[in-house]
Amino acid sequence: MHIPDGILPAQVCAAGYAITGLATWYSLRQINRRPDPAAEVPKASLLTAAFFVASSIYIPVPPASVHLILNGLLGVVLGHFAFPAILIGLFFQALVIGHGGITTLGVNASMMGIPALLAYHIFQLRNSVGKPLAEPTRTGVFAFLGGALGLGIAALIFLGLIIFNIPAELDAGAEQTAVLALSLSHVPLAIVEGIFTAMLVLFLRRVKPELLEG
Amino acid sequence: MRLRLKFAWLLALALASGAAPALAHGVTVEHRQVSSVELQARFDTDEPMANAQVLVYAPGNPTDVWQQGTTDDQGRFSFTPDSSQPGTWEIMVRQAGHGVLTTIPVADSTSGGEPTATPVTVADTGANSLISPSAALSPVQRGITIGSVIWGFIGTALFFARGKH
């Protein structure tokens, strides 16, 4: 779901970098307000490694195959660390694996990072909206929602970006059908990532509950 | 498919000769051999990029599309570059927001010989033309690079975990 170089016009790439700059500034400011900003860096660093590798793991969804993104998972587990983690992970993916590109790094980071921040806030809702539910169910359900919606919103942003930036020379109808099919194949992936997020969060809750407090 | 193509070809001939199609039934076919370029687009999972749209741009004219088409089931597309326009032809293959822009050099034909075009395989559409280091790396080199990056992340984690104590 990474947008490679040369697909989007220069203005969109520049706007992507601007939004990424703002979101990074916001995330770093929130991190800096914590009593010990460096305390969560080990967790963030390990999950950045997981994010980096995840895009090489392909899941066949007929007729195409999609790869894991894990942006919702990062948002749920890392909170405000998710945005810098995704930015760094995407940078290395562009350089080493060839997913995405340097000119579109800003667009990709906004597309995956901002839904990750939303996923974090969805997960936080478990303490307000989710009150009526019993405890392990509550955490699991909201972790699933965060993981699945984080990816779902990113797929919607991807769909919008591509559909509104089809060059005039291309057959717009065929391209729209193709991109719609690709986005639809992310629905099962969102469910898989939601379940994966819920499993990881429930595991962390059992072995190291303080990791989920941040 | 073949039948339909043949029909289109005859129709084109008739139109080109400018004669009324119903009056003359004599058909002449002239032929000459030309060099064409075949390219194949694949995703980096080695899956062929079927039915992707292909745009061909002639040298020196990056704004107007010279030829347009789609790849077949195997991700293949071929076209015959105009030999009177030697230079670098640009090909864009694109599908569902994935794509690649590649260049194919076509040699000058003024030397009298047949125009020669270098066949190029467009691979690795996950990578792109601006940075595609992964296409040039062997699997071992790629594995080592990925491993080094992961070790960098783990090292960062260990460093900050140690600082807490």
Image: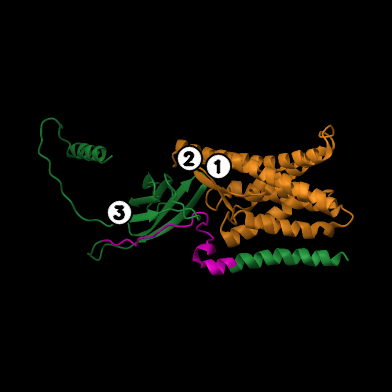
Chain colours: A orange, B green
Name the amino acid, label 1. Answer: Ile
Query: Which chain does the residue under circle 1 lie in?
Result: A
Residue type at tag 3:
Asp
* Pointer 2 residue: A175
Q: Indicate whether B17 appears above or below A100.
A: above
Give the crowd class for mark 3: few <14, some 14-19, many >=20 residues within 10 Å. Answer: some
Tell me if residue B159 can be seen.
Answer: yes
Label 2 resides on the chain identified as A
In front: label 2 or label 3: 2
Q: Nearer the viewer, residue B60 or B67?
A: B67
For label 3, the residue is B82
| Amino acid on which disc 2 is placed | Glu
Q: How crowded is the residue under tag 1: few (<14 C-alpha within 10 Å), some, or many (20+)?
A: many
Label 2–label 3 contact, CB within 8 A = no
| Most distant residue in the top direction | B22
Q: Is label 1 in a helix, a strand or a loop?
A: helix
Q: Is B140 in the magenta?
A: yes
Tell if the residue under mark 1 belongs to the same chain as the one under mark 2: yes
Q: Is residue A164 visible?
A: no
Mark 2: few, some, or many residues within 10 Å (few <14, many ≥20)? many
Q: Which residue is mark 1?
A: A162
From the image, which quarter does the C terminus of chain B lie in?
bottom right
- Which image quadrant for residue B142? bottom right
Q: Is residue A70 above or below residue B158?
A: above
What segment is highlighted magenta in the picture? B115-143
